[in-house]
Image: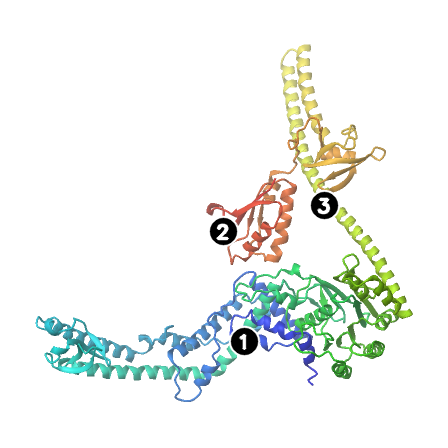
Amino acid sequence: MDENKIDSHTLKVLEFDKIINFLGRFAATELGKQYCQNILPQINPILVQERLLETSEMKAFLGVSDFLPFNTLRDIAFLLKKAEPEGSVLLPLELWEILSHLESSRLVKDFIKSRKEQSPALWSIANKIKPLSPVEDQIGKAINAEGEILDSASKELVRIRLKINQVKIHIRSVLEEVLNRPETSLFAQEKIITLRHDRFVIPLKADFKKRIPGIVHDQSHNQATYFIEPFYVVEHNNELTLLKEEMKREELRILKNLTTVVRGEKKTLLENQKYLGMLDGIQASAWMSEAMKAREPKLIKEKEINLLQARHPILLNQSFPDDPEHYPQFDNTTITPVDLFFPASYLGIVISGANMGGKTATLKTVGLLTLMVQAGMHIPVAEGSTLPIWGKIFADIGDEQNLEESISTFSSHVVHLKEILSRADEQSLVLLDEVGSGTDPEEGAALGSAILDELRCRKSKVIITSHLNLLKAYGISHPDVLNVSVGFNPITLKPTFKLVFGIPGTSKALETASHLGISPQILSHAKSYLKENDRRILVLTEYLEDILQKLNAIKINFEKTLDSAARYEEIMAKFVDNVKGKQKILFEHVEIKAQKLFREVEIEVKKLRKSNFSFRNFKEIKNKVSATVATTSEDLKRIAPSSQTLEGLKKGDKLFLGGKEGKVVAIDLSSKKVEIQTEGVRLKTGLDELARIECTLIPSSQAPKGSFSKINVTTSESLGSLSSLNLIGLTVDEAIPLVEKFIDNALLYEIKKLRIIHGIGTGRLRLSIHQFLQNHSRIGKFFLAPPFEGGAGVTIVELEP
């Protein structure tokens, strides 16, 4: 067995062939499909990284352009084989196939060359393609898409065809003169010139066939019409026949010459074809990644697996349409994802738990995703997932889920285990489903424990599934082995398909039997048959599961608290920004009023100096200055801290806080703190901060619902940036989060109409944004802008009130 290849049995039981067949459906050409069929997982980390990089670079193309120009690409290997013998001739349409291949080679290379700075891995492949422009020019000059040999193929061909046309015109003119004679109208069946046996003839009535001397070439079915070649055009018809033969010889000579040219470039053409098939296969991998919403995981040197939100790719495949013409996205929400963390410090994982709970599916998911990565494919996982490169991967799947052949007998298990034990080392990942099954449970568990001992001694990484209590206990008693159980809902008595780390799981056989209607008496009797050790393990496991559920509840509440705190921090940050803007505007306003006051005082003083001072003058000046100072003082109060601003505030009062309606839920006068609930979030702040933010009380008896006097401190400049978003140049994955944040900000500042600038391009970005808007609960309607506002490159969005 080749040590540099992944075990063939592993590929079979993990159903890698189904992924390969699925991948081939995304290829644009047969060459790409052939490349996909030959893809195998690699064990060289450098090679794996190169393959993943190629897929990632190609996927980046999908965000900015359509397919690579493979549409005219065909497999030309059989044509090149036909052209091998000296003197062989390729037909015009066959030469056109060669021409299409040459054009595709040139276009694909040029396409990738234009993006080589962003795609060095793809350019390293495309740069090996050798365009054959002289050959392309020669064939293109001689042949068209209909398989016709063009006049431009040779000067001799032009001369011959010109002569043929001249002779045809002469023959037609002679025959037309005959048909136009008055006497001919009596015996001509109709005044037409036609061909019989590639010679020009005229139709005569049978009774008058001898009226015009000539050669009879044919007659009608009812023998009423004879087709006569008059003697005076026989010589011209003979000349035409000779010219046509001469033309055929010249055309044959042209085809032979072109075939010879193609024969001389056979090696280059086959090499180009190999690289084109490779690029189409990589493009197929990129399209599959796009469809699966997959990504490239981070490769690490440590033997540690961290898969986040991993989905089984074959389950995704089952939901994929039969004819993926436009490569639609999968609905990943229909498949329960799994998180699996296999720390570097551990050597083994024992997965146990309820029947049909996802143990085998988890094992296959880990194995298949690992194979896909080492074959250069992206995998359906969340950001942050990491995987190592394994030198060897072994799998023995005990059940027959989705397997085409039964391989679940105990003897076949032992054969595969023997093979694994003969080859496994510290570079190995070993996946064993229901190890020790198919025989006596105690003996099977003992065998499984011994196999785990041996693999741990070799520093292999092992993941097993089991129902056997002895193997669950093995995970508890060995510090480098981790117990993992599949989740089970005790209320619905159904699996949750979630992994629970740190405790073993029970099979839930008795609970399932109860749920399905087995009587309590039988179940109680069944428990009496359990051995004492089994009962203890069962009770302990259930106790641990109960504790874990309580810890999970605490965790969920803690996460909710953290989320509320984060939302509080975000809203307060926006309030602070609003306040700063408000303060700036008011200070500028106050400064202007103060300057105006000083100017007015200066003018009045000058007037006093020039006129006779009187008490009445003094009162007028005093009143004017006092009025201005009073107005300015009111402005200053609006931005100065004041604990007296909301002294009358009480629990239940409504107010506007930074343009948002809020409700007072608690007041602590000793600490001068108030707690406000706004938009489902509770905010705690000081009374002085409320004064700075400028809250407006809403007396319930005075303010009708929906008619509050709101205070908006956002400047006109910021409103401009909040109502328009430019996404040109971004990918779908980059753009959608920005659109979501953009809409959230608009809702916060109560902006009703938005412009999203996405450009025209391929339309992928626009369609993805429209799909997001369609599913957003606060979108009233959206439509493309009129031509004078950007047309198809801009989407106008109107928010619901």
Q: Residue at x 62, y 60 (%)?
A: 331
Crowding at dot 3, Cα within 10 Å, few <14 / some 14-19 / many 20+, comes out as few
**89 horizontally vs 468: left or right:** left
**545 horizontally vs 746: left or right:** right
The dot on residue 792 is: 2
The mark nearer the N terminus, 2 or 1, is 1
Give the foreground label among 2 and 1. 2
Q: In this view, does 121 lie above or below 612?
A: below
**Which quadrant of the structure image shows residue 753?**
top right
Q: Residue at x 83, y 59 (%)?
A: 548
Separation of marks 1 and 3 at Cα, in angstroms: 52 Å
The mark nearer the N terminus, 3 or 2, is 3
Percent position of residue 615, x then y:
69, 10
Separation of marks 3 and 2 at Cα, in angstroms: 35 Å
Q: In this view, does 600 lie above or below 222?
A: above
Q: Nearer the viewer, residue 364 or 238?
A: 364
**711 horizontally vs 473: left or right:** left
Q: Which of 730 and 780 is in front in this view?
A: 780
Residue type at numbered disc 3: Glu
The dot on residue 570 is: 3
The dot on residue 170 is: none
Mark 1: which secondary structure? Answer: helix
The dot on residue 275 is: 1
Q: Work out which residue is located at the far right of the displayed protein and give it.
A: 532
Percent position of residue 671, x then y:
84, 35
Residue 614 in sight: no
Name the quarter where the C terminus is drawn.
top right
**Which quadrant of the structure image shows residue 479?**
bottom right
Mark 3: which secondary structure? Answer: helix
Q: Is residue 228 above or below residue 614?
A: below
Percent position of residue 132, x then y:
45, 77
